Image (cartoon, rainbow, N blue to C red):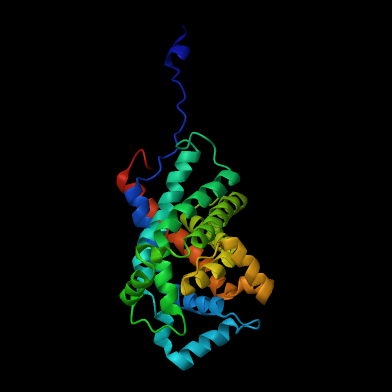
Amino acid sequence: MSAAAANTKPVTELKKPLPLPFAYTFASGAIAGCTELLLLYPLDVVKTRQQLDTAKTSTGMVQTFKNIVAQEGPGRLYRGILPPLFMEAPKRAVKFAGNSSWGAFFTNNGQRKNTQSLAIITGCFAGATESFVVTPFELVKIRLQDKNSSFKGPFDVIKHSFRTSGPLGLYQGMEATFWRHWWWNGGYFGAIFGVKGALPKATDKKGELLNNLVAGTIGGFVGTALNTPFDVVKSRIQLHGTGEWTYPALIQVARTEGLGALYKGFAPKVLRLAPGGGVLLLVVEALSTVFRGYLGPPYL
């Protein structure tokens, strides 16, 4: 054997960093979710009001906002924020931790190359997981946001639900919530994967932040466009406590109010969730970088 051959070392392939442990993805998602909620919650109140309006000619977003402030006071724009605030940590945490866990499952811990199809199905499964956590909080929030709500607060809604529908009453609208999160997460994470692949590769931290903001914003728009009809039906089922199935309810709304009714509340919803999706991704990615640096290899 020649000296050159003897000194030749085998080339070691660079391994991809392992997914962060669940506790760290949970913390990242929780902090990101609370940040987004506190910034953009009034748009959620406006969205719900529009979705609950069954008139064929509904009031626009700006006028709905003005009416709430003029007739009920600006504080009403934050009515019902406690349930989603308590929910936001587990909701966003489950969203991103679930996406990370399902992604590890579908790619065999990174051994299988991720594709846009895998990113979409991973997001859908993460959304399905998330729906089991958020349904009770969503029901309480909707009943507090309603214009005609006479509930004193979240616990009043919970007591009323237990009294009239039993312990499972808080899970009314579970099926519609499932579909809402299935389609939003699938669209959101699928779009992020596609947009990130299409954007020029970032060469510095500033470029990486910009790419995350653009991808997250587009992902938020795509997810909102896909899931708004399910959100309209969910809001109505949870307000009235009906046991309707989602897809027949979609057909009923389209027949009685027109197809456009399935997109009531779309403007405030997309104004919240498109930039909100960007904010979420920015915060999650920033915190993930911090956590990876703290943990070191094999997460770095």
**Nearer to me, 218 or 165:** 165
Vertical order, 116 against 138 (above or below)? above
The residue at the far bottom in this view is: 70
On screen, residue 207 versus residue 29, left or right, reads: right
Quadrant position of residue 109:
top left
Vertical order, 296 against 283 (above or below)? above
**Nearer to me, 300 or 191:** 191
Residue at the spot x=50%, y=38% of the render? 107
Residue at the spot x=46%, y=49% of the render? 99
Give percent across and percent down for residue 110: 47, 37
User: Which quadrant of the rendered structure holds the C terminus?
Assistant: top left
On screen, residue 215 versus residue 72, left or right, reads: right
Vertical order, 125 against 249 (above or below)? above
Vertical order, 150 against 250 (above or below)? below
**Nearer to me, 122 or 133:** 133
The residue at the far top in this view is: 1
User: Can the viewer see residue 81?
Assistant: yes
Give percent across and percent down for residue 84: 39, 69
Residue at the spot x=51%, y=76% of the render? 48
